[in-house]
Image (tube, rainbow, N blue to C red):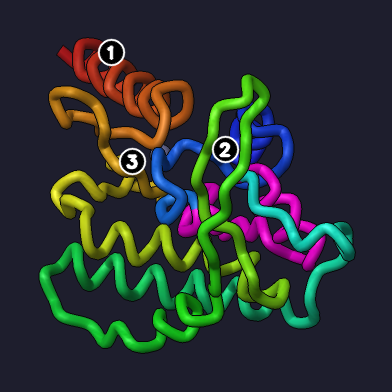
Amino acid sequence: MAISAILHEETQTGAPMLGDHLAMDLLNTEARDNDQAIEFWNSDAEVLQWLARYGIAPAAENSSLAPTELLTQAKTLRTLARKLITEFKEEKTPDINELNQYLHAFDTAPHLARDAEGKLTLSRVSHTDSMGSLLGPVAEAVAQLLVEGNFDLVKQCEHPDCVLWFYDRTKAHKRRWCSMALCGNRHKAAQFRKRSSSSDSV
Ligand SMILES: [Zn+2]
């Protein structure tokens, strides 16, 4: 089965959600199937659908409308995030200022509310235009990773044909694959083939 088919089966609506961190899943909106690049963001609607899966939605009054240039802006943020995360992983010190443009556009204020049981909750709600409120939380996740993340746990799937990223939250920190079902099994099958072909030749 092709990776794209498996990815699709696992997630149904687009990009895989296996990064265990929003910043990782952002990078995983681009994948690879053998030599072919897979782009999960081809329209504003696809970006909106992806954001909605993480509970990020445009302001209520225009809830189904994407701001103009959402696709372009989202892809620019993704390219920037990929550069920053890769360079942090390589222990370089990249320019972080461009990320601030997205962070500053994410203007939030404290918001007091009661939950279903009447308990008070304090959260932050967006006060910005829709572009800021849509891409702001994603930019914040990237910034949070840069500040607090352990870059030994920021990993790329070990399968040579795979480009997916994840944050290794397993206890032993030995996660090697984007998913066992996907690349773990591909690897096992390849090892098995290798073993059986070498035993044939003996
Ligand atoms: Zn993989």
Q: Mark 1 highlights which residue?
A: 196
Pointers 1 and 3 in contact (C-beta within 8 Å): no
Q: Is residue 190 left or right of residue 49?
A: left
Q: What number is the disc on residue 65?
A: none
Q: Which residues are magenta?
A: 26-54
Pointers 1 and 2 in contact (C-beta within 8 Å): no
Measuring 70% from the left and 48% from the top, which residue is drawn there? 52
Q: Where is residue 179 drawn, in percent x and y? A: 42, 29
**Is the shortest distance between ligand 1 and the CB of mark 2 under 8 Å?**
yes
Q: What number is the disc on residue 159?
A: 3
Residue 33 inside the magenta-drawn segment = yes
The amino acid type of the residue labelled 3 equals His
Cα gap from disc 1 to disc 3, whole angstroms: 20 Å
Query: On the rendering, which quadrant does ligand 1 occupy?
Result: top left
Q: Mark 2 highlights which residue?
A: 3
**As drawn, 132 above or below 5:** below
Dot 2: within a 10 Å radius of its alpha carbon, few (fewer than 14), some, or many (20 or more) residues?
some
Q: Quadrant of the C terminus?
A: top left
Cα gap from disc 1 to disc 2, whole angstroms: 24 Å
Cα gap from disc 3 to disc 2, whole angstroms: 12 Å
**As drawn, 142 above or below 152:** below
Q: Quadrant of residue 96?
A: bottom left
**As drawn, 68 above or below 112:** below
Dot 3: within a 10 Å radius of its alpha carbon, few (fewer than 14), some, or many (20 or more) residues?
some
Identify the secondary structure beneath mark 1: helix
Measuring 65% from the left and 75% from the top, which residue is drawn there? 128
Which badge, 1 or 3, is on the more N-terminal residue?
Answer: 3
Identify the secondary structure beneath mark 3: loop
Residue 110 showing in the rendered view: yes
Measuring 40% from the left and 45% from the top, which residue is drawn there? 21
The amino acid type of the residue labelled 2 equals Ile
The amino acid type of the residue labelled 1 equals Ser
